[in-house]
Structures are given as C-alpha cells and as structure tokens.
Image (cartoon, rainbow, N blue to C red):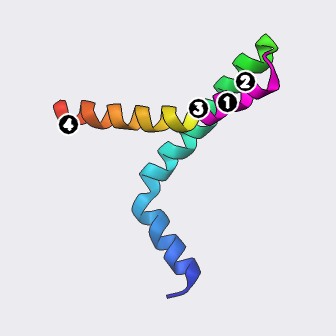
Amino acid sequence: MSALDAVREHVIEHHDGMLFDLVFAIAWVVLVTVLFRGLGAPEPAYYVALAGGVVAYYGFTYSLKLARESA
C-alpha cells in the first residue's frame, strides 16, 4: 500500500470528523478576526484568542458528546 492509498483510506474513514474540524477552525478564525480586528484589540490578545480555539474546540466536542449520550 502506498502512502497515497493510506491517506485516501484514512480520509474515507474519517471524512465526517475531518469536515467538522475544518468548519470549526474556519468559523473560529473568522469570528475572532472579525471581533478583534473590528474592535482594534492589541495583537497579543488576538493571538491568545486564536490559541483559545483549541480549548474551545475540545470543550465544544466534549459537551456535544455528552449531549448525544444523554439523548
């Protein structure tokens, strides 16, 4: 199996999760950029908010998992 076949197989197996990750990342960056650039916030605050997307992602996916288990 070539590397390309391995990547293709991985994408086929995980395409829903990868799409969710991509949409969340794009939405987070757009939201933070609009808020912080629009308000004229300092550059370090902008980067801290972008890095906060990692925590937001795991918090959101964990709460989504809990909601699905309880339903």
Do tag 3 and tag 1 residues touch (Cβ < 8 Å)?
A: yes
Query: Label for residue 45?
Result: 2
Neighbor class of circle 1 (other Cα within 10 Å; few <14, some 14-19, many 20+) is: few
The mark closer to the camera, 2 or 4, is: 2
Q: For residue 15, which numbered disc appears in the image?
A: none
Which range of residues does the magenta coloring cover? Answer: 41-51
Residue type (three-letter) at the residue carrying disc 1 = Val
Label 4 crowd (10 A; few <14 / some 14-19 / many >=20): few
Q: Residue at x 57, y 81 (%)?
A: 3
Q: Marks 1/2: CA distance?
A: 5 Å
To which residue does mark 3 refer? 52
Name which of mark 2 and mark 4 comes first in the sequence: 2
In terms of secondary structure, where does tag 3 sit? Answer: helix
Residue 43, position as x, y percentages in the image: 81, 26
Classify mark 4: helix, strand or loop.
helix
Identify the disc placed on residue 48: 1
